[in-house]
Amino acid sequence: MDTHTHLAAAVAVKARIPSSAPVTLPRLQVSWARSETEVREAQALRYQVFAQEMGARLQTPAGAPAGLDIDLFDAFCEHLLVRCEGEDGEPGPVIGTYRVLTPAAAKRAGGLYSDTEFDLTRLRSLRPQLVEIGRSCVHADHRSGGAIIALWGALAEFMARNGLDIVIGCASVSMVDGGHYAASLWNKLQASHLAPIDCQVRARLPLPVEHLRQDLAVEPPALIRGYLRCGAKLMGAPAWDPDFNTADLPLLLRTADLPARFRRTV
């Protein structure tokens, strides 16, 4: 891994919950994986969320340990981890993760993960300043928002330290209804959140929105709603990921568009 790109220390934040909730706020610790053991913790959480909870058919390499979500890009990525502190103040298990692919690492990997789902030709000039985030997930018991906020803050600091200012990634939408929700969501969001033409991409395996309902009254999932509030733009129509059975919306976010609390050092 490129250890020189890691943050100097873990970031500790308070998880956000309603002020009336009669519970103690857990402290969240955010850090970058510095060992194979820590990467394995992230991969175990991903397996739990993607395979066991969502039913994804993960394409793991032959001979990979059971119970882990592993793919060929993991070895080139930096892995961002968030943990809850235990009662003794010691860090607990990983409850949230992102993986981050830097421009230099993408060259070594032969491209971005998004290249496998989309034609990114129009982004060629942006690649030197672009990082890709992916495999984001949070444990089911910690999806109130605090974990994602902590990850975003650490990601913004990482990008500032490394002189990077563009993030891309795919936001996945369930297709348990056959894709009608995803098609309706795309139809709703493209009118107000579509990226300029020079940043638009094309799906290699498009979701066939023309054959699906696009008139459902839908709202974005919480994660996508958060991205859009931060200024993210849709780069094009969704791709269909048959392994995860999701519709993947390609998103682009410039750090200059982030709210101030996420870019204190940008």
Image (cartoon, rainbow, N blue to C red):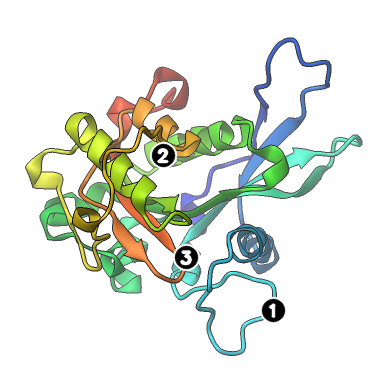
Residue farthest toward the bottom in the current orientation of the protein: 62
Residue 45 showing in the rendered view: yes
**Disc with the residue nearer the chain's start (2 vs 1):** 1
Judge depth for marks 2 and 3 and give the one in front: 3
Q: Is residue 153 left or right of residue 215?
A: right
Q: Earlier in the sequence, mark 3 or mark 1?
A: 1
Q: Nearer the viewer, residue 265 or 24?
A: 24
How packed is label 3: few (under 14 Cα within 10 Å), some, or many (20 or more)? Answer: some
Q: Disc 3 marks which amino acid?
A: Phe
Q: Position of residue 198 (x, y in %)?
A: 8, 45
Q: Residues within 10 Å of mark 2 (few under 14, many from 20)?
A: some
User: Distance between the Cα atoms at labels 2 and 1?
Assistant: 36 Å
Residue denoted by label 1: 66
Amino acid type at circle 2 is: Arg
Residue position marked by numbered label 2 in the rendering: 161
Q: Which residue is mark 3?
A: 244
